[in-house]
Image: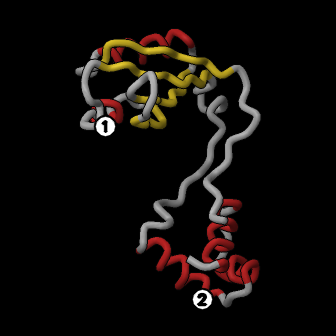
Amino acid sequence: MDDVDRALIAELQRDATQAYAVLGKAVGLSAGAAHDRVRKLRERGVIRRTTVEADPAALGRGVLAFVMVDSSAWMGDSAESFAAIPEIQEAHIIAGAASVLVKVRTATTEQLQEVLRRLYAIEGVNGTQATVALETFFERPVCAG
């Protein structure tokens, strides 16, 4: 990856709906060259997908919690079990006091409690510790620079 690739990614993260002519102009390329580079970045897996960033509260998912999951077994083979809970946005195997860290968005704290119950149903899970976010200062994408 060179500086032009990084600039393309930054521009796409800012607005992925840009025409290739606009995108190319922003980074000093023709529309065709910008299109070719973006295609190659996709083929190499650098750009994994193009998506829309929606407001969670507007979608009825205003409660954000981070849950540390304790286990009695290795959880590395449990990805599908965590992915089966639609309220979980992210799940990470971690080092430290817990085994897994999950990011959960629900409409209510009662729904969060139900997610915690479903986490306990995953084989090997023997505890959780949830932290509810009161306010989010910012969230940002991974910087290409």
Mark found first going from the N terminus, 2 or 1: 2
Q: Can you tell which quarter of the image residue 97 is in?
A: top left
Q: Position of residue 72 (x, y in %)?
A: 27, 18
Residue type (three-letter) at the residue carrying disc 1: Ala
Q: Is residue 16 visible?
A: no
Identify which residue is drawn at 59% across, 51% down: 52
Residue 33 is marked as 2
Whether residue 104 can be seen here: yes
- In the rendering, at what x and y percent does residue 19 appear? 66, 75
Number of numbered markers: 2
Eye-nearest disc, 2 or 1: 1
Q: Position of residue 65 (x, y in %)?
A: 56, 23
Q: SS at mark 2?
A: helix
Q: As rendered, which of 5 and 83 lies closer to the eye?
A: 5
Q: Is residue 9 above or below residue 103?
A: below
Q: Residue at x 54, y 76 (%)?
A: 38
Side (left or right) of 121 relative to 132: left
- For label 1, count other residues whose C-alpha is less than 10 Å away and answer few (under 14), some (14-19) or many (20+): few
Dot 2 surroundings within 10 Å: few (below 14), some, or many (20 or more)?
A: some
Quadrant position of residue 133: top right
Q: Find residue 41 and name its label.
A: none
Vertical relation: 23 (above or below) 91: below
Q: Which image quarter holds the C terminus?
A: bottom right
| Mark 1 lies on residue | 79
Residue found 46% across the figure and 61% down from its top = 48
Q: Which quarter of the rendering shows the N terminus?
A: bottom right
Under circle 1, the secondary element is: helix
Q: Amino acid at mark 2?
A: Ala
Q: Which residue is painted at 70% across and 20% down in the image?
A: 134
